Image (cartoon, helix red, strand yellow):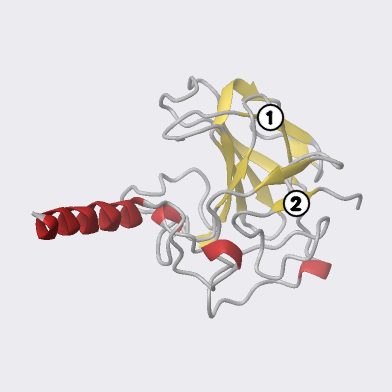
Amino acid sequence: MKVVIYIALFFVCFSCIKKDSFISDGVGGQNGFANGCEGIFYPNRETSLNVLPYPIGQSYSIGLSHCSGSEHSEGEPDQFAIEIIMDVGTLVTATRKGTIMYVEESGLDFELPNNVVILRDEDGFFHQYQHLTYNGALVEKGQFVNKGDYIGYSGASGIARFPHLHFVATDFDWVNPYGTNPYKSYPITFSNTSDNPRSLIQGQTYEALPY
């Protein structure tokens, strides 16, 4: 009888480990969280043109990030995406100056579609701000914005499991990441916060500093 109980406990514990969303396939960091992707070239944070996607003086914690498992695992379209944990209705700002290419804001929180604002920067990358709240866009298609400008309010639209901003820089604009032609994400760093040589680290909190 004891043998049966021990075997049952083993499988329960194993299944819990498999379901843990924080299992990392990246470089080991504190508390078992991912610390960026191994073998990847990251842009120099000190010369980065990108700033955090929220106003100066605000601080937010990071959920899944680069190579941190689930849809953010190595080789997935969202390998270099970042979850920034924010309450619904939190101001989101532009990470770089550029032109707004696409706006979707008709989705309700925790329902499809996934609300998103997509900005094309001067280098041709597309900065995607996903899971915005219903009617949460503050910009229009074709509008030019400077980095730091308000572009929307965070939410939990689409397939979001909880309220947060899903930020990712890609090589396509509004292509479904898991469609026939998935986008490819790229690693970026941020100049207006504490040192982040491998971008924002899962489990850490970052304050947006003046720039």
Q: Residue furthest front?
A: 2
Residue 31, given in percent of the width and then of the height, sits at 57, 62
Q: State whether residue 96 appears in this view.
A: no
Between disc 1 and disc 2, whose residue precedes? Answer: 1
Identify which residue is drawn at 55% across, 32% down. 163
- For the residue labelled by badge 1, is the local secondary structure a helix, a strand or a loop? strand
Identify which residue is drawn at 80% across, 46% down. 147
Give the CA separation, mark 1 to mark 2: 20 Å
Q: Residue furthest left?
A: 1
Q: Which mark is residue 85?
A: none
Q: Amino acid at mark 2?
A: Tyr
The local crowd at label 2, few if under 14, some if 14 to 19, many if 20 or more residues have their Cα within 10 Å, is many
Q: State whether residue 6 appears in this view.
A: yes
Residue 132 against residue 20 in the figure, above or below:
above
Query: What is the quadrant of residue 41 in the picture?
Result: bottom right
Residue 63 against residue 161 in the figure, above or below:
below
What residue does disc 1 label?
152
Identify which residue is drawn at 67% across, 35% down. 142
Residue 155, given in percent of the width and then of the height, sits at 58, 28
Q: How many marks?
A: 2
The local crowd at label 1, few if under 14, some if 14 to 19, many if 20 or more residues have their Cα within 10 Å, is many
Residue 7 against residue 92 in the figure, above or below:
below
Q: Quadrant of the N terminus?
A: bottom left
Identify which residue is drawn at 15% across, 59% down. 7
Q: Residue furthest right?
A: 210
Q: 150 or 34: nearer the eye?
A: 34
What residue does disc 2 label?
206
Q: Nearer the viewer, mark 1 or mark 2?
A: 2
Report whether 112 appears left or right of 56: left
